[in-house]
Amino acid sequence: MPQLVRQANSLLSSDHNLITPDRWPADFAELEINDEVRSLVMKDDAARLLRLHQD
């Protein structure tokens, strides 16, 4: 967790003006991430973070 906070306060926070909402999914699609992790990042983790539970 400390590493995530450190990155959010430095590198990640500086990208918010550079990476547009249209560009982010395209760049993410090019990463070598297995499908299970990709699903977690793009859907499951986001839904949990936003408290969008499917009951």
Image (tube, rainbow, N blue to C red):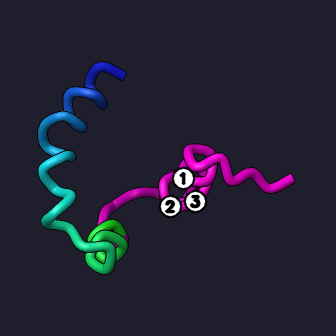
- Look at 20% across and 67% down and name the residue there: 19
Q: Considering the numbered disc 3 on the image, is that residue within a helix, a strand or a loop?
A: helix
Q: Considering the numbered disc 1 on the image, is that residue within a helix, a strand or a loop?
A: helix
Q: How far apart are marks 3 and 2 (CA)?
A: 4 Å
Q: Residue 42 carries which label?
A: 2
In the displayed structure, does residue 9 sit left or right of residue 28? left
Residue of label 3: 43
Q: Residues within 10 Å of mark 1 (few under 14, many from 20)?
A: few
> Is 39 located above or below residue 25 in the figure?
above
Q: In which quarter of the image is residue 7?
A: top left
Q: How many marks?
A: 3
- Look at 47% across and 57% down and name the residue there: 34
Q: How far apart are marks 2 and 1 (CA)?
A: 6 Å
Specify the amino acid type for callout 2: Met
> Is 9 located above or below residue 11 in the figure?
above
Specify the amino acid type for callout 1: Ala
Dots 3, 2 in contact, CB < 8 A: yes
Q: Nearer the viewer, mark 2 or mark 1?
A: 1
- Look at 54% across and 52% down and name the residue there: 46
Q: Distance between the residues labelled 1 and 3?
A: 5 Å
Viewport quadrant of the N terminus: top left
Q: How crowded is mark 2: few (under 14 residues within 10 Å), some or many (20 or more)?
A: few
Find the residue positioned furthest to the right.
55
Dots 1, 3 in contact, CB < 8 A: yes
Dots 2, 1 in contact, CB < 8 A: yes
- The percent coordinates of residue 43 (x first, y second) are 58, 59
Magenta span of residues? 29-55
Residue of label 1: 46
- The percent coordinates of residue 15 (x first, y second) are 16, 56
The stretch drawn in magenta includes residue 45:
yes
- The percent coordinates of residue 36 (x first, y second) are 57, 55
